[in-house]
Amino acid sequence: MSAEPVMAENITRRYRTGRGINDVSVAVAAGQCLGVLGANGSGKTTLTRLVAGLDRVDRGRLLVLGTSAYPGSLDVRRRCGSALDTPAHWNTLTGRQNLYFFARQYGLAEPELSRRIDELLDEAGLAGQADEPAADYSFGMRRKLSIVQALAHEPDLLILDEASAGADAAFLERLTHWIKQRCERRQTTWVADNDLDWLSRTATHAILLADGQIKARGAVPELMAAIGAQNHVEIVLDQPISIEPPEIAGIAQFQCRANQISAELDGNPELPVELMRWIASRGGRVRTVEIRTVTLREALTRRTGSREAEP
């Protein structure tokens, strides 16, 4: 039995159009969030549908939670949560009723059921529209509802396709928070998306697909640090303050003049957050922050020596 929640070994799936994936191998461990990147037609949606158990491989072996992904047992399906590119709702039901139905299907019961529904609707910014028909929801609201439906039962494996499409910045930050919490709980997340800046803050690992094959892979911090890029940070404080340079690995050329701070950081996406915390611990109150940051797109495209990551 596979120890990894997702284990693909030399899998191939081709369609009459010629598109699909060819000889792909990838493993996702417990507690990881894998970002699946690639241009339209690269094969990322095909691979995601295979992992979700919606299609079968032509060749190779694909295991999800220790068993064959297709057709997948009822137990495995209950341990997964999926929000793919097409929302699944009953338009005549309200958002709350849709969420209630899906959560019940996955085994949640009262009193936890109602508490979990209220919590998710509030954190997703849907509480004010929870009792309106889903038919009246905007595209972005439908995407939010799809994602919280997939999250409601705390699945061992969460599968998202184009999660950022139509989502506002506040919801994406909340989703990042949820995914990081899942990683801490040793739950696994699979995200196929083209918002590389968001994925660079969210995913622990990433693969880049092009022409149905994996062209690059690795842990996100290592990918971004490996290109030797620098993030330039400009900070304006509420009041002038004297702050000494921080003793944090990866932060260089730190300057504090009156109420303005500038610094050069290496490509680790966690460093800006660490710097903000350090400034706050020295009594600084941040008014504005501007970060010109390296992106996951740069890291992956430089590794392949191509422009395959362009959406």
Image (cartoon, rainbow, N blue to C red):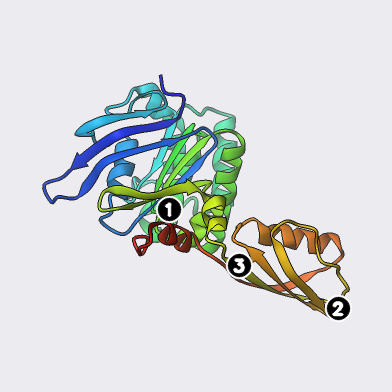
Determine which residue is flagged by label 2: 240
| Residue 230 circle label | 3
Front residue of 301/74: it is 301
Marks 2 and 3 sit apart, C-alpha to C-alpha, by 26 Å
Percent position of residue 118, x then y: 57, 43
Percent position of residue 199, x then y: 49, 55
The amino acid on which the numbered mark 1 sits, given as a three-letter code, is: Ala
Any part of residue 124 in sight: no
Marks 1 and 2 sit apart, C-alpha to C-alpha, by 41 Å
Residue at the image point whose x is 35% and y is 28% from the top: 63
Where 291 falls versus 196 (above or below)? below
Q: Secondary structure at mark 1?
A: loop
Relative to 210, is 183 on the left or the right?
A: right
Relative to 221, is 17 on the left or the right?
A: left
Q: Secondary structure at mark 3?
A: strand
Any part of residue 84 in sight: yes
Q: Quadrant of the C terminus?
A: bottom left
The amino acid on which the numbered mark 3 sits, given as a three-letter code, is: Gln
Residue at the image point whose x is 23% and y is 38% from the top: 12
Query: Tag 3 or tag 1, which sits nearer the N-term?
Result: 1
Q: Secondary structure at mark 2?
A: loop
Determine which residue is flagged by label 1: 163
